[in-house]
């Protein structure tokens, strides 16, 4: 987007990284955190996007872009209606590097848990209970790490924090 006045392009880049489009994702096969096996590898151009994810047949995985080059980027994930009551497939969101973390409160089934300074992955783990259509997480990047701005899941214990297995 950019702003046409001298010195204001930094503001334009921040705006570009917070608006986006709605995308529907239905993985053709189970995704993992192993390089080359992710469902979606996000890029700077995906800033602001809302992903409606169908995990009814396969696990969906999203690798976030490098935090160091995406200050101000926001991204949102929602399980779509086809994912409602799914009990075997998961949603995994993980960082580009094991030195970048996802931090903040996760809310599921009315309880709050913490995604702390050693977590580089978030998972809606359906082995802990069925997923709900509308379960969600929204993230923002500060240029070093990713932070949850909001989250919610119907089933208690559905959100799990982890160190993503990349090999």
Image: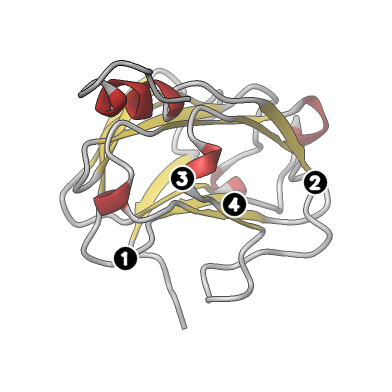
Secondary structure type for disc 3: helix
Residue 126 lies left or right of residue 54; in this view the side is left
Q: Nearer the viewer, residue 3 or 122?
A: 3
Q: CA distance from mark 2 to mark 4?
A: 20 Å
Q: Are marks 3 and 1 in contact (CB under 8 Å)?
A: no
Above or below 135: residue 58: below
Residue situated in front as seen by the camera: 56 or 145: 145
Residue 87 % position (x, y): 71, 45
* Disc 4 secondary structure class: helix
> Whole-percent x and y of residue 126?
61, 46
Q: Are marks 3 and 4 in contact (CB under 8 Å)?
A: no
The foreground one among 137 and 89 is 137
* Quarter of the image where one finds residue 36: bottom right
Disc 2 to disc 3, C-alpha distance? 21 Å
Give the CA separation, mark 3 to mark 4. Answer: 32 Å
Tell me the residue at 38%/32% (across/down): 139
Name the residue carrying label 3: 44
Residue that numbered label 1 is attached to:
97
In this rendering, the label closer to the viewer, 2 or 1: 1
Disc 1 versus disc 4: nearer the observer: 1
Mark 1 vs 4, N-terminal side: 1
Q: To which residue does mark 4 refer?
A: 127
- Which of the numbered marks, if any, corresponds to residue 152? none
Residue drawn at 59 percent across, 68 percent down: 32
User: Which tag, 3 or 4, sits closer to the chain's start?
Assistant: 3
> Disc 3 and disc 1: Cα gap in Å?
15 Å
Q: Which residue is mark 2?
A: 26
Task: Nearest to the eye among marks 2 and 3: give it.
Answer: 3
Q: Earlier in the sequence, mark 2 or mark 3?
A: 2
Residues at discs 1 and 4 in contact (Cβ within 8 Å): no
* Disc 1 element: loop
């Amino acid at each position: 987007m950019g702003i046409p006045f001298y010195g204001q392009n930094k503001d334009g880049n921040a705006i570009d990284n917070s608006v986006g489009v709605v995308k529907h994702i239905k993985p053709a096969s189970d995704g993992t955190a192993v390089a080359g096996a992710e469902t979606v590898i996000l890029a700077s151009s995906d800033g602001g996007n809302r992903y409606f994810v169908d995990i009814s047949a396969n696990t969906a995985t999203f690798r976030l872009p490098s935090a160091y080059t995406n200050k101000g980027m926001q991204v949102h994930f929602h399980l779509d209606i086809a994912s409602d009551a799914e009990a075997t497939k998961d949603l995994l969101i993980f960082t580009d590097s094991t030195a970048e973390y996802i931090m903040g409160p996760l809310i599921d089934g009315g309880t709050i848990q913490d995604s702390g300074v050693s977590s580089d992955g978030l998972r809606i783990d359906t082995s802990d209970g069925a997923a709900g259509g509308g379960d969600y997480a929204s993230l923002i990047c500060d240029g070093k790490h990713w932070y949850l701005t909001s989250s919610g899941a119907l089933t208690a214990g559905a959100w799990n924090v982890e160190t993503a297995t990349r090999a």
